[in-house]
Image (cartoon, rainbow, N blue to C red):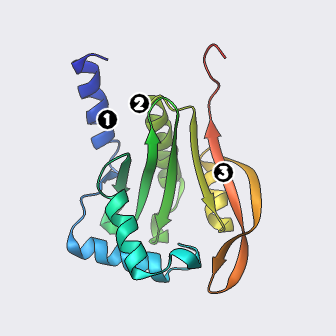
Amino acid sequence: MNTDTEQAMYERLMQPSSMFRIFVPNEEKVKIFSHKLLHEYLYLSDEYRDPPKIQVMLQIYLSGIASIFYELPNFGGLIGFINIVPEYKAEITFKLWDRTLWGPTFLRELRNLTEMMMDELRLIRLYSNTPDKKMEKMAHLCGFKTECAQRYGFRWNGRYYPLKLLAKTRAIKGG
């Protein structure tokens, strides 16, 4: 890739739309996000809902190495692209706590964001998982398909849920 192409890609990734902006962590926002991960319904499975584990997880994800997080308006949630392997795959995580943002505009912008990430990073697979039926429905509206469900794949407050595995894929060129 030439530097002009790389610069254009960088600019698109940094400012994909007015709805999403790059998440710049500060102490207050990390504290809020940590609290959400620890306490919000179906955000993390029980085996990860421990403050020291959450701190390590956030250090890894928010370091910017193989991950990009976008913040919603008024810090109403985060969308993270993690475990990015350019020209192959990435995982997307949805942590959306301000449901007043949900609507046709949000869904259109989110669909555009996932398409832009797939285009810019030349991904053939964007995947996620969730035990939450509402998040599964939202992902379907953004073009994801449910591939399967892991029985007892997620545990929250001792209760077991099926973990739905979702993906948005593209055909491999020449394959």
Q: Residues within 10 Å of mark 3 (few under 14, many from 20)?
A: many
Q: Amino acid at mark 3?
A: Leu
CA separation in Å, label 3 and label 2: 21 Å
Q: Residues within 10 Å of mark 2 (few under 14, many from 20)?
A: some
Q: Residue at x 38, y 78 (%)?
A: 52
Sequence order check: which comes first, mark 3 or mark 2? 2
- The correct choice, above or below, for 12 with respect to 129 in the image is above
Please give the label number shown on residue 162. Answer: none
Q: Are marks 2 and 1 in contact (CB under 8 Å)?
A: yes
Q: Residue at x 44, y 38 (%)?
A: 117
Image-based side of 92 in relation to 68, left or right: right
Q: Are marks 3 and 2 in contact (CB under 8 Å)?
A: no
Sequence order check: which comes first, mark 2 or mark 1? 1
Image-based side of 63 in relation to 124, left or right: left
Q: Residue at x 32, y 63 (%)?
A: 59
- The correct choice, above or below, for 29 with respect to 14 in the image is below
Please give the label number shown on residue 120. Answer: 2
Sequence order check: which comes first, mark 3 or mark 1? 1
Asked whether residue 95 is in view, the answer is yes
Please give the label number shown on residue 12. Answer: 1
Q: Position of residue 138 (x, y in %)?
A: 61, 57
Q: Position of residue 111 (x, y in %)?
A: 52, 44
Q: Position of residue 166 (x, y in %)?
A: 66, 51
Q: Amino acid at mark 1?
A: Arg
Residue bearing mark 3: 166
Image-based side of 104 in relation to 72, left or right: right
